[in-house]
Image (cartoon, grey):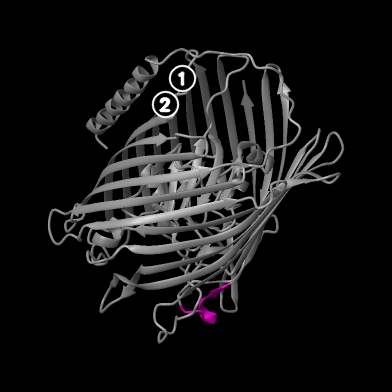
Amino acid sequence: MSYMFYRKELWLCVALSTAAMSAAQERDTLILRSLSDVEVVEKAPPPAMRAGAPVRTLDRAHIERLGMQELSEAVSRFSGVMVQDYGGIGGLKTVSVRSLGSQHTAVSYDGITVTDAQRGQVDISSFSLDNVESVSLVIGQADDIFHPARMYASAGALNIRTSEPVFTDRPRHLRFKVRGGSFGLFNPSARYEQKLGRALSLSTHAEWLSAGGDYPFTLRNGRIVTKEIRRNSDIQSLRTEANLYGRFANGGTLQAKAYWYDSERGLPGPVILYTTRSRERLRDRNFFTQVHCRAPLSGTLTWQALAKYNYTYSLYHKTDAQYADGFTEDRNAQREYYASAGLRFAPASPWSASLSSDVSHTSLASNVVEALAPTRLTSLTALAAQFRNTRLTVTASLLATLMRDEVKQGNRPADRRRLSPAVSLSFRPLADNALRLRLSCKDVFRVPTFTDLYYIRMGNTNLRPEKAMQFNAGLTWAGRIPSLARHVTLSADGYYNRVTDKIIALPTMYVFKMMNTGRVAITGADVNAEAECPLGAAFLLQLSSSYSYRHAVDVTDPDEKTYGHQIPYTPRHSGTASVACENPWVNIGYMLTLTGVRYVLPQNTAANRTGGYAEHTLSLNRTFPFRACHMRLQAEVLNVANRTYDVIRYYPMPGRSCRISLSIQY
């Protein structure tokens, strides 16, 4: 990257941050009022239990109890979710909700979506869990109607919320953490928080990750079983982030963020027969800066505005004698300019409405001579209304999508237009009972990615967007069981999804080509249970479990061999269970992940069948004071049973491994 690029990005970051601070300084100073004592007699049901669509949430306390260290570990605890993991510490990790594919899942970082127009999927391994306050997943129509229009456009939304500073005893906080473990893992990080005044605060976070990544695995080739080493799995990555927060007396909020991620990793590739060595490397760089402001205009009207600039650069390098120079390189650079504005109107207590409008401009540049250098202009407008009281919540929305692509040469696809409605309902049938019924329906419209449309020799500019319909019906209950559990939540949901114009790669005369030929019907159920059980005055046992059933089959053509077959990498049965025991000595956490049989290709034959697996993780942690600091020590054992398995066929996962971390907070 050239010096000129860095200077431009830096000035853009400074300009946005300065504008945000100027807006903050125009607000009134923070006013503090003393409230009388309040006695809490019962824990209120969590918002997820009152939502009209399935919502899964993990907060910071739950993450620490179970000893989770990576974002993918937290997301995999949600029912109805599949984390596609290509193995290793630096392996790509994407999220698919209810078998719809990772392109149907939006990922938001502090309220603003993370996008990749080239591939349409987000690698969640590029985000740190150390800086996260909560992780939540919404499937279908969200109850929160006051968010950007882009959040209405996906089948599911993974929301990552970073930690906002809270100052009680001192105006600054400092935290150091170092983590090490098997396969050469070394992962130091630091976080600094500073109070800038009554209404403003600042936080910075930096993290370095280094790992050799060469781990042993078992290779089975027919009757021959050998012990091998997974090569070319190393990674070096740097994450840095700075945040400016504002909370003002009139209820207004401000957050400005600058983020940088830089990684260089090996791509170990698939293990096929005895081919275990890969000579592929990937360099990723991602910079974005964003500003989000929200404030009331009156007692009934609230506005919000946000803006984001995103730059993503990737360099793929492969060494092979088949190339004239002995290697090949693909360079791709994406730029996106994004803005959103919205209004929320709440004229009376049970009623509210919102209007949000987004616009974005995205471009892709590549070093490939035949590249079409596409640009995309997108306009999204969402109108939503909600009725809410203590027993009934009804939410309805309508999303208008307008998208236009331009290319420097060749044919461009037709403009895309679509109206996508959604509705959800949550109802408590009995006034004195916490049992609730929820129903939701949503139309989803996924536009083909730049790779689908323009990738050399595979792209097809005549592709139609995928269309999906989501239906969900469920029951939730939250309460307590006297003398056994002080807090219990239960939920069960059944759903049906239908996808038309499914975009898949089909073989033609010489190469694969992207085609609209697929239709998929997905029927399933998700069950979740959580409980807090006090065991005397000093012990607390926290239990959680989830189960998912998915019947996701191809219904494209009854005459095809794949008709009625389970779609690739979709297990019929999967589940999780976890136990956390808090006590005065050493807190204990245990996690179990179960995944059933899957098929790696559309035809469900014995040759395409890959077995299920169970993974056990055990963690121990203890927090104790050390002078003016708090120290936390944690140790973990992953894959306790040392089971060899693949999430993606031919990409073996590591066996048993250990991690240990030490953090000091001042």
Cα distance between the residues tagged 1 and 2: 7 Å
Residue 250 bears which disc, if any? 1
- Range of magenta residues: 603-610
Tell me the SS state at disc 2: strand
Is 225 displayed left or right of 618 in the figure? left
Secondary structure at numbered mark 1: loop
- Look at 52% across and 39% down and name the residue there: 350
Task: Name above or below for residue 283 compared with residue 245.
Answer: below
Picture residue at 37% right of the left edge, 73% below the top? 518
Quadrant in which the N terminus appears: top left
Q: Residue at x 73, y 27 (%)?
A: 624
Q: Residue tagged by mark 2?
A: 295
**What amino acid does circle 1 point to?**
Asn
Residue 210 location (% of width, % of height): 50, 41
Percent position of residue 497, x then y: 48, 65
Magenta region includes residue 609: yes
| Lateral position of residue 472 relative to residue 323, left or right | right
In the figure, residue 561 lies in which quadrant? bottom left
